[in-house]
Image (cartoon, helix red, strand yellow):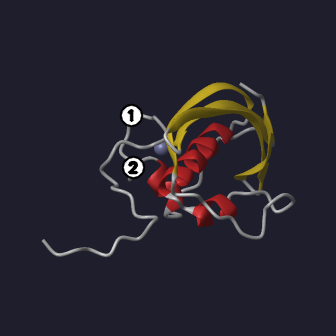
Amino acid sequence: MSKMPRSRTKFDSAAPCPCGRAQSYGDCCGRFHRGEAAATTAERLMRSRYSAFVVLDADYLLRTWHPATRPGTLGLDPTHRWTGLDILTTTDGSAFHQAGTVEFRAHYVHEGKRGSQHEVSRFLRDDGRWSYLDGQNSGN
Ligand SMILES: [Zn+2]
């Protein structure tokens, strides 16, 4: 077996999608990451952004960040391993809304310890495209 150079953003497209939907990564969030489709709801964007953290696709995260709050650069820590996403509640955020919120809990393992991030994220839709505005930590 020869060693294949592996890009850090490469993720097996046949593997189950990290976002938790019952689809392969390639058919689910992978389509958004590759730029072949855009998320039609705030929840789908949230899921695809979570998946982008898993596959270390910082470019996608910046691309789907609202210009008003988007950081100049984004470094992702590969030792911070995201292990699951629970969508708790959503408000608005459909293809007929201009704004929406998604409350979620994202689970991770970091330095051998399990933890989770509980957040309410706000999303805006401009020109038919959803983007992430900001998030408020909800504690645990
Ligand atoms: Zn997905």
Q: Marks 1 and 2: in contact by CB < 8 Å?
A: no
Quarter of the picture holding the N terminus = bottom left
Cβ of mark 1 under 8 A from ligand 1: no
- The structure residue drawn at horizontal position 64% and vertical position 58%, both measured from the top left corner, is 61
The quadrant in which residue 10 appears is bottom left
Q: Secondary structure at mark 2?
A: loop
* Residue 68 in sight: yes
Q: Residue 133 placed where, x, y %?
A: 80, 49
When asked about the image quadrant of residue 119, the answer is top right
Q: Amino acid at mark 2?
A: Asp
Residue wearing tag 2: 27
Residue 78 left/right relative to 120? left
Q: Which residue occupies 73% across, 52% down?
A: 131
Task: Inspect this view and state whether residue 40 appears.
Answer: no
Q: Which residue is mark 1?
A: 22
Query: Label 1 amino acid?
Result: Ala
Residue farthest toward the left in the current orientation of the protein: 1
First in sequence: mark 2 vs mark 1: 1
87 or 77: which is nearer to us?
A: 77
- Secondary element at tag 1: loop
- Give the left or right position of residue 140, taking residue 59 as reference: right
Q: Decide: is 125 above or below 72.
A: above
Give the percent coordinates (x, y) of residue 111: 53, 45
CB at disc 2 and ligand 1 closer than 8 Å: no
Q: x, y (%) of residue 85? A: 54, 34
At 60% from the left and 60% from the top, the residue drawn is 76
Q: Residue 15: image x %, image y %?
A: 32, 47
| Viewer-side residue, 94 vs 89 | 89
